[in-house]
Amino acid sequence: MKALIIDGYVDEPACFGVPPYISPYIRYLAGAMREQGIPIQDIFYSAIDSIRLKPKDHEKIIREADLVVIIAGMTVPGKYLRSTPISLQELHILSRTATGKVILGGPIRLGFSSEGGKKASSLSGIENAYCCGADVEAFVYDMLKDGKLENPVNLADRFRSVQEIGRWAEKGAFIIRQHPDYPNVMCELETYRGCGRRKHCSFCTEPFYGGPDHRPVDDVIAEVQGLYEEGARYFRIGRQPDLLSYQSKDKGGDLPVPDPMAIESLYRGIRAVAPGMQVLHMDNANPATIAAFPEESEAILSTIVRYHTSGDVAAMGMESADPEVIRRNGLKVSADEMFDAIGLVNKIGGRRGDNGMPELLPGLNFVHGLMGETKETFRLNHDFLKKVLDSGLLLRRINIRQVMAFQGTPMFGNDAAVEKHKKEFLRYKENVRKDIDLPMLRKVVPAGTILRNVLLEVNDRNTTFGRQMGSYPLLVGVPAKQGIGYYTDVTVIDHGFRSVTAIPYPLDINNAGLELLQRVPGIGKTMAAKIFRGRPYKDTQELMGKTGINPDILKYIEL
C-alpha cells in the first residue's frame, strides 16, 4: 500500500504550517500510517508548491497512491514570502487525478477559501474526496486497521488522544526529509491545544478543539529528539494558545495557574536532546495570564530566555483597546493590563542577542470588524500603540487584520463592521504603519545592526529577500542579486514599515558592485566611486592610504 500526504499548508491562531514551517499534522499522519504497517518507503510527502512546479512528475505519484491525504485550511489570513496555500480549484484537480481514496483534513474542516476568508462553499462537491470532521490523523489511523483501507463513509470522526500523538509524532519524524526546504525546515511543536477560558473570544476557532489537552513533557522532548536525529535544527513551540499555561493548574479561577517548573523541564529537556539546534522559539502567550500571574509569568519568561535562541517573539492577542469591543467579544485583557504585559516581556527579553535581534519581544495582534466597533475604536487602538512607542517599550511586530467569521463562533453573521468601517480601517492601518511601525523598527534594529544567519530565499529583479529562521522573522531586502538558499550575515542600512534593507556583512570591498559600496554606512556615492576606481586593495592600510576612508567604516567591510 502506498500513501501520499499532500501539504496544502495551514495557518491557524495556534498552528502554522507554511514553508519553511512544517505543521504537526504532517508528522502525526506519517507516524499513524507507519504504526498501522505502511513501510517508510511507501509513505510519500509533497508540498503543494512542489506540485505546482512539476505537475506532470507528481501526477504519476498521485495516481499510484492507494491513499491520498490533503492537509489544508486557513482560519486566519496571512501574507507569505514565497508560498501560497492550496486553492479550492487545486483541491478539485488533485481529487480528480487520484485513483485511490482521498481524505481532506486539518482546519479545512472549519471552513475554507483560497484567500483564507470566511466560511467557504461546501466541500462536498469535491469528487472522490472525504472531508474529516475531526482529527485527520486519527481518522486515517482508523481507516488503516487490519492492513486494509476502510470506506471512509463507514467510519466515525474522532479526536486523537495525547497518548496517540505521543507515539505518532516520534514515528513520523522521518517525513521532514521529504520537505523541499530540508534541512532548513522549522518544526512546529505542540504542547497542548484547546482553550480553557470560560468565555471565549468571539471570533476564535481554538475552542472547537475542546478544553486544554496537555501533552506530557517527556513526549514533547522525545518528539524533538526524533526530529533532531532526522536532521531538524529549527524548532518553534507554537501549537498552543498560551505557552505560559502549559501544564497549568485549574484552581477554579477564570484562568489556570501557570507552572514555571513544567516550562523549565520542557526547555531544559529539549536542549539536552538537541544540543546543536540552531533555533528554539515560541509563539503564543496570553497577556491575561501575565496580568493575572505576573510572578509566575516572569519566572517562565526568564526560563525561556535562558534556553531559547534570540529573535524570539511572544505573540499576544490584544485584539482591541476599546472597552466596549472588549466587553462585547469576551476579549482577554484591558489596555492597561496589556501595557503591563508588554513591559514585563521587555524587561526579561529586551536585550540584544547573538543573532542581532533582541532576545524576546512581544508581538501584538489586533482584530477589526468585531462586535461593538465604532470609528472611535481606531483612535483608541492607535493611541495605545503610540503610548507604547513613546514609553520606549519595543514591539517586534504589529499584526492588524479584519475578522474572519467561522460558523459556530459568536462572530458568525455579526461582522457588518468589516464593510461599514472599511475606509476607516485602511486609513488607520496606513497610519499605524507610518506612525508606529517605522519608528518602532528603527528602535528594534537600528541602522548598523548586524543580523546573523539570514537565509536568502527570493530574487525579485535586483533585490534578494531573506529572513532569519524563526518565529515572525524580519524580512530583509538586499539590493543586489544574490544566490538563493544560502545563509549570510548582513548589516542593516535602512528601514521600511515592516522590513529592512541590508547589505552583506562584511562586504567584500574588492568585488562588491558599486550600488552595494554606496550603501555601506558612512561611505556615500563619492567615496564609493573613489573606492571602486582604485580596486583592488591588498589590505586595509592600502585602502585607507589611497582613499582616506573613515576608520569606523572598516568594521563593515573585508578585503
Image (cartoon, rainbow, N blue to C red):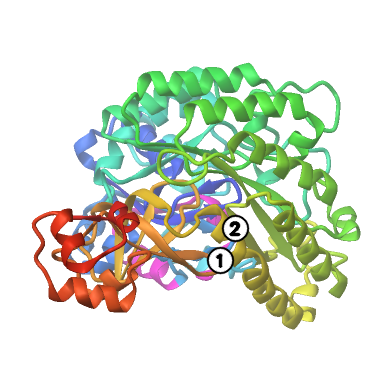
Q: What element carries label 1?
A: loop
Residue positioned 43% across, 61% down in the render: 475
Q: Reply above or below: 388 against 381.
A: above
394 vs 96, left or right, is right
Which quarter of the figure is the C terminus placed in?
bottom left
Q: Which amino acid does label 1 sit on?
A: Gly
Which quarter of the figure is the N terminus placed in?
top left
Residue positioned 48% across, 51% down in the render: 105
Residue positioned 71% across, 62% down in the render: 367
Residue on which disc 1 sits: 116
Query: Could you say which quadrant of the image residue 419 lies in?
Result: bottom right
- Expressed as whole percent of the image width and height from the top left, the position of residue 186 reads 38, 44
Asked whether the viewer can see residue 214, the reply is no
Query: Could you say which quadrant of the image residue 397 lies in?
Result: bottom right
Residue on which disc 2 sits: 75
Q: Reply above or below: 71 against 253.
A: below
Considering depth in this image, is 494 or 268 the residue closer to the camera? 494
Of callouts 1 and 2, which one flags the residue occurring earlier in the amino acid sequence? 2
Considering depth in this image, is 124 or 116 the residue closer to the camera? 116
Q: How far apart are marks 1 and 2 (CA)?
A: 6 Å
93 drawn magenta? yes
413 vs 397, left or right, is right
For label 2, count other residues whose C-alpha is less than 10 Å away and answer few (under 14), some (14-19) or many (20+).
Answer: many
Considering depth in this image, is 332 or 540 the residue closer to the camera? 540
- Expressed as whole percent of the image width and height from the top left, the position of residue 539 reads 13, 54
Q: Reply above or below: 470 against 377.
A: above
- Expressed as whole percent of the image width and height from the top left, the position of residue 530 reads 21, 75
> What residue range appears in magenta?
89-116
Q: What residue type is labelled 2?
A: Thr
Q: Do the residues labelled 1 and 2 touch (CB within 8 Å)?
A: yes
209 vs 166, left or right, is right
Asked whether the viewer can see residue 25, the reply is yes
